[in-house]
Amino acid sequence: MSTQGLQDIARDPDFQLLQRSKNRISLVLTLVTMLSFYGFVYLLGWQQQWLSQSFSGSINRGIPLGIGVIVLSWILTGVYVRWANTQYDALVERVKAKMTVDIAEEPGA
């Protein structure tokens, strides 16, 4: 593909939307994951008294919070998979279709 063809794709509104939406969801999901994980680690390191208080019987607060971090990561993975299957894949296919047309139109292709 020529440099001009690559520049055309980079300027394509669908490609730009693809790039923006991928970056946005990656950033949001990464931040939520890191905040939950490092927040839990912070609590483990600096708020041990609070975490060790009883939640229910012999279970302290740290157990459900730790399980919550794990469950949240599963949920965020599900959010990403759903987004990728419903939006990202369709945009990728549109951009790929445009690339195929551009390549077919190039001289010597």
Image: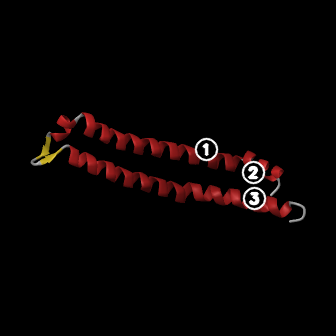
> Which comes sooner in the sequence, label 2 or label 3?
2
- Judge by depth and name the residue closer to the eye, 87 or 102: 102
Which type of secondary structure does the marked residue at label 1 adopt? helix
Secondary structure, mark 3, is: helix
Left or right side of 34 for 17: right
Q: Position of residue 78 (x, y in %)?
A: 43, 56
Residue closest to the far left: 57
Q: Residues within 10 Å of mark 2 (few under 14, many from 20)?
A: some
Residue at mark 1: 20
Mark 2 falls on what kind of element? Answer: helix
Residue beneath label 3, please?
99
Mark number displayed over residue 1: none
Residue highlighted by disc 2: 9
Q: Residues within 10 Å of mark 1 (few under 14, many from 20)?
A: few
Mark earlier in primary sequence (2, 1): 2
Are the residues flagged by discs 1 and 3 in contact, CB closer than 8 Å?
no
- The earlier-in-sequence mark between 1 and 3 is 1
Q: CA distance from mark 1 to mark 3?
A: 19 Å
Q: Name, please, the residue furthest toward the front.
A: 45
Q: Which residue is depicted at the point 52% across and 46% down?
A: 25
